[in-house]
Amino acid sequence: MEEPAADGAVLVQLDLGRAKGGLRASLEEFSSLALSGGYKPVATVRGRRDRPDPRAFVGQGKLREIGDAVAREGVRHVLVNHALSAVQARNLENGALACVVDRTGLILEIFAERAQSYEGKLQVEIARLRYASSRLVRGWTHLERQKGGIGLRGPGETQLETDRRLIARRIHQLEGELETLARRRASARRARRSVETVALVGYTNAGKSTLFNALARTRDGEVADRLFATLDPKLRRVPLLGRPDVVLADTVGFIRGLPHELVAAFRATLGEVSEAALLLHVVDASAPDRLEKERVVLDVLGEIGASDLPRLDVVNKIDRLGESPRVERDAQGLPGRVWISAGTGEGLDLLRAAIVERLAPRVRKGRVTLKAGEGALRAALYRARIVVGERADARGSPVLDLAVDDGLWKRLCASYAVDPDRLRDALPRRRTARPRCAAREALPRGVE
């Protein structure tokens, strides 16, 4: 009997109910995910249901169709373009006689293969362990009770409970290591707080790494026409005409249905995004579902607390549409969208000028009262040369008058865990004297 192909796979896609815009996952995108994960799609089974079957996700008829496709193509993998519960995955495996991998598991496999740095590997392992801990139900046949030890009450714990405890212990250990790395990353950000960070964000395969290489004039960022070519963040100092250098950060791409385990694990890495002075949202101009992908990116930015940061949309790959480079401005007259081609270099000068314009300092005058124990913050404010005056209030607390750029103030507040709203808008105005009126002064007292 011929050995089944190890990389062959049957794809399963169900259209559930009334799909809403970006919530419907593209089958073409899922095929690209399968190829990125090392699988070769050989057949596709599609269907439509109002709601997934709680037992095997698909109905009995569709389950037989999947099993027939597996037997006909001689493969041993079924890739499902949805998130499955542990029970659904097990019943689907039993019915199709093949190994079942859902969308979340496939993305985790790709991340595990692509992670290069130690921090990235830790993040992926934590995400995979969290994913596995939710799928231990009836995962083994040895679930009989173990004997309790001498002096212990009760029948002891099940093998399932033991596995969960070991996974939880491993996650706790990895999170400790990741926390240490996160503190080092935060210290590095504080060390360069005088240098503004511009972070590249966008849907996976939108051309972020190509744009990173073009702006930084380097070839360090991997460029490949595949999903999740870049996982580990890359930082490079980039000179801009007429202003101090900035730090350009390239980060992991987003995707529909990005597992929450990954978002949580990569939160330390995505801190480069949440503390950036400007986000460059890279969009693939040639993507047919461009608007849906933009919405997905904005949702993930909201999840990591970066939705309110200044953002400049960069519409990339205009050479595929025959478009010309241009800059679109918002209601305030600032650059809001730049059309470029990172591959050919068209429009890069427009993009650099737009970045400079968006990073132009917007000085805000205000007054902040420091609390006891905030001596380090006071020293940082003086080092930044934004203090224009200082006095003490009635309680003896220092009150500093500042003239500071909004972006710098927010970065300082993030570094020292200070609420940005403590800086009161505008210094108090002096009350001006009432204008003299000769006619009013001539009236008797008490008469206006």
Image: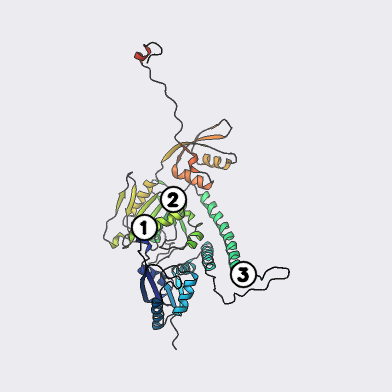
From the image, state whether disc 1 or disc 3 is nearer to you. 3
On the image, numbered disc 2 is attached to which residue?
A: 246
Dot 1 amino acid type: Glu
Return the disc, 1 or 3, that comes first in the chain's sequence: 3
Of circles 1 and 2, which is in front? 1
Residues at marks 1 and 2, CA–CA distance in whole angstroms: 25 Å
Label 2 sits on what residue type? Val
In the figure, 257 relative to 393: above or below? below
Task: Identify the residue at horizontal 38%, vertical 71% (top origin).
Answer: 13
Residue type, mark 3 in image: Thr
Q: Which residue is mark 3?
A: 162
The crowd level at tag 2 (other Cα within 10 Å; few <14, some 14-19, many 20+) is many
Q: Mark 3 or mark 2, which is nearer the start of the sequence?
A: 3
Q: Nearer the viewer, mark 2 or mark 3?
A: 3
Q: Is residue 131 visible?
A: yes
* Quarter of the image that includes the C terminus: top left
Residue 237, position as x, y percentages in the image: 45, 53
Where residue 371 appears, as percent x and y from the top left, is 57, 39
Q: Is residue 97 left or right of residue 327?
A: right
Tell me if residue 177 comes above or below residue 97 in the rendering: above
Q: Regarding mark 2 in the picture, which secondary structure is present there?
A: strand
Residue 342 in view here: no
Location of residue 101 in the rendering, given as x and y in whole percent from the top left corner: 46, 72
> Residue beneath label 1, please?
294
- Outermost right residue: 151
Looking at the rendering, in which quadrant would you find the N terminus? bottom left
